[in-house]
Amino acid sequence: MLIPLSLRRALLLGVVVATGCTSAKKPLPTLFFPEPPTPPRIQYLYRFQGMEDIKPPSQFQELVVGKADTFRFAHPYGAAYHDNKIFVTDGQFGIVVVIDLKERKMHALATGEQGALMRPTGIAVDGEGTVYVADAKRGEVLRYSAEEKYLGAWTTGEGSRPVGLCIKGDRLYVADIRGHQVHVWDIHTGKLLQEIGRADPGAGDELAGGYLVAPISVAVDSQGNIYVCDSMEAHISKFAADGTFLQTIGNPGDAIGAFARPRGIAIDPADRLYVVDAAFENVQLFSPAGKVLMFFGGAGSRPGLMWLPTAVAITPDLPDYFHSRVDKEFKAEFMILVVNQYGPGNVAVYAFGEHEKYPPVYTNPAALEEGGGQGGMR
């Protein structure tokens, strides 16, 4: 029997409306770190796992054309932020994924044939929007313009294995895990300016802290001090701007302030140091003097927790895209990005700030029970 077109449309609309009523996603409950009675400083906001998280298909589209195959991260590693865009490297796909918060789109960075990536790890973006990507397999740092045109590559020669990147002012800092050093480049001229750390321990230098065994990430504070995560030594080496060794932060262990598998590091606007630990599956915060302040995260697949995290990135403010997700009584100051290689939250988004009416009402005790959040700001 033929069904009149008008009736078919009415039936279809009814199904769409019914589907919308039954499958609408409920907003996530508010999750703060650390847990009470310590005052909250970090709120979990959102996560990106694939294309559907930036602009999910409408229920009408799913009903009419079915659920289309969409991109999802496979092996994300590093992250950076610039001008409402989140840049994430994916080592398995050999690409940089650009999450455009303003346009609500996700795409792979155009690299061209010469700029094709093999195993991208660390990533950084300068003030002009130029993107720098460390490729551990190519042994180079590749550069792309804000318009996604390949600009060329920098390397210190055969045997180099760049992994972590950081930009401060007009300088690019490159953690070379095989060369046991941090190389400093002028981003305008491409000139190699400085080498931080000793590639050869020398007489007594290893004890003095100048020798880097496996530098995997690097960050620079407002005073120009350089922090290097040594994944083999399980500590952070701190150097003055001129390369003079100053101190180590942390040590191997399982207590708060110690590390098991430290990975990415970052510095926030107040010069606090953030250190990702892939074994503890959390992020620890330290003062500029190296005193542990708090930690957030913890092992688990629930929202706000972590699963083999590798990188952390800090933005100077909080993008408009996330404002509606901030608790109305929480004064967010800036955004924290954490990259997880597994789980539903490959790119997890947090806000750092203060709660206006402490103590707040915690509405997600189940998530807090499954892992971290216990470390309080000291």
Image: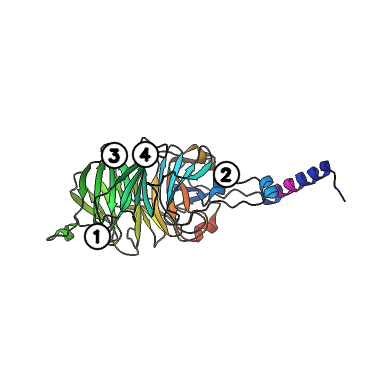
Query: Label 4: few (<14), some or many (≥20) within 10 Å?
Result: some
Tell me where residue 303 appears, x and y as whole percent: 52, 54
Q: Mark 2: which secondary structure? A: loop
Distance from Cα at disc 4 to Cα at disc 1: 30 Å
Q: Spatial distance from mark 3 to mark 2, Cα to Cα?
A: 34 Å
Q: Which of the two labelled residues, at mark 1 and mark 2, occupies the earlier sequence position?
A: 2
> Which label was assigned to residue 373?
none
Q: Residue furthest front?
A: 113
Q: Is residue 316 above or below residue 210?
A: above
- Where residue 363 appears, as percent x and y from the top left, is 56, 51
Residue most toward the right? 1
What residue is at 70 percent from the left and 48 percent from the top? 64
Mark 1 Cα within 10 Å, few/some/many (few <14, many 20+)? Answer: many
The amino acid on which the numbered mark 2 sits, given as a three-letter code, is Lys
- The residue under label 4 is which amino acid type? Thr
**In the image as oriented, which residue stretches furthest toward the left?**
203
Query: Which region is colored magenta?
Result: 15-20
Left or right of residue 108: residue 209? left
* Residue 38 is at least partly visible in this image: no
The residue tagged 3 is 187
- Residue 189 in the image: state x and y as whole percent: 25, 37
What is the distance, in whole Å, between disc 4 and disc 2 at their CAs? 26 Å
* Gap in angstroms between the C-alphas marked 1 and 2: 43 Å
Dot 3 amino acid type? Ile
Q: Earlier in the sequence, mark 4 or mark 2?
A: 2
Residue assigned mark 1: 213
Q: CA distance from mark 3 to mark 1?
A: 26 Å
Q: Nearer the viewer, mark 3 or mark 2?
A: 3
The dot on residue 130 is: 4
Please, is residue 308 above or below residue 14 in the view?
Answer: below
Mark sitting earlier along the chain (3/1): 3
